[in-house]
């Protein structure tokens, strides 16, 4: 029996499920809409609304809690350089350091997600009173779509409410 069990397993092991949900939350914050299955949309909505509620109050503790949930951005360049220096005696280290430089200089949009959440998305909802309906929560909307063509899975669009 599933009494008081509030999460969906989505037919995946825990690590894969959490990675999927974190990636979809990132995509939601980046693009402000995600097309996915209904079950995934409901789980992503739960995670996203908790993060937005935390981000409404911008302080160090809330930033740390949100950073734990959102995927980590790529390692800063100085940390990678120190790692490469430690491995200098290894002949592969030179090749790795060149690869690290190329990778470091490439654009990584996930670096901006945290700032976008705290500076653009959360302030939209900051004016809501806590005791009013939708004061904490109600930041997203799920709109159902026709089933997916290949497997007839029920699809939905998850949107950030304006």
Image (cartoon, grey):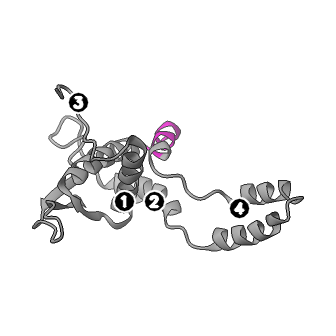
Image location of residue 47, percent across then percent down: 32, 45
Secondary structure mostly seen in magenta is helix
In contact (CB < 8 Å): disc 3 and disc 1: no
Q: Distance between the residues labelled 3 and 2?
A: 30 Å
Q: Name the residue under label 1.
A: 29
Percent across and percent down for residue 34 are 28, 63
- Element on which disc 3 rests: loop
Disc 3 or disc 1, which is closer to the eye?
A: 3
Report the residue at 66% width, 68% height from top: 104
Q: Which residue occupies 43% across, 44% down?
A: 15
Q: In what element is the residue under mark 4?
A: helix
**Split into 4 quadrants, where in the image is the N terminus?**
top left
Instruction: Measure the alpha-carbon separation of dots 4 and 2.
Output: 19 Å
- At which x and y percent is residue 131? 19, 34
Earlier in the chain: of badge 4 and badge 2, it is 4
| Mark 3–mark 2 CB contact (< 8 Å) | no
- Circle 2 residue: 113
Residue 159 visible from this viewpoint: yes
Query: Would you name the residue on which mark 3 appears?
Result: 5
- What range is drawn magenta here? 58-66
Q: Can residue 127 be seen in this view?
A: no
Residue 94, magenta (yes or no) = no
Q: Reading the chain from its start, which is encountered first: label 4 or label 3? A: 3
How dense is the environment of label 4, judged by Cα within 10 Å: few (below 14), some, or many (20 and up)? some
Q: Given contact means CB atoms under 8 Å apart, are the residues at marks 4 and 1 in contact?
A: no
Q: Is mark 2 on a helix, strand or loop?
A: helix
Residue matched to label 4: 77
Q: Residue at the spot x=51%, y=41% of the render?
A: 64
The tag earlier along the polypeptide, 3 or 2, is 3
Q: Earlier in the sequence, mark 4 or mark 1?
A: 1
**Contact? badges 4 and 2 (CB < 8 Å):** no
């Amino acid at each position: 029996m599933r009494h008081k069990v509030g999460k969906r397993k989505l037919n995946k092991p825990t690590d894969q499920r959490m990675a999927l949900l974190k990636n979809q939350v990132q995509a939601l914050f980046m693009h402000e809409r995600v097309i996915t299955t209904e079950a995934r949309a409901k789980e992503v909505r739960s995670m996203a609304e908790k993060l937005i509620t935390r981000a409404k109050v911008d302080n160090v503790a809330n930033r740390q809690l949100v950073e734990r949930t959102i995927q980590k951005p790529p390692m800063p360049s100085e940390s990678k350089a120190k790692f490469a220096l430690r491995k200098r005696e290894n002949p592969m280290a030179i090749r790795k350091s060149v690869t690290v430089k190329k990778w470091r200089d490439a654009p990584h949009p996930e670096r901006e997600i945290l700032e976008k959440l705290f500076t653009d998305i959360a302030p939209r909802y900051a004016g809501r009173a806590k005791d009013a309906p939708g004061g904490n929560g109600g930041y997203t909307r799920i709109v159902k779509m026709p089933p997916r063509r290949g497997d007839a899975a029920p699809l939905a669009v998850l949107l950030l409410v304006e």
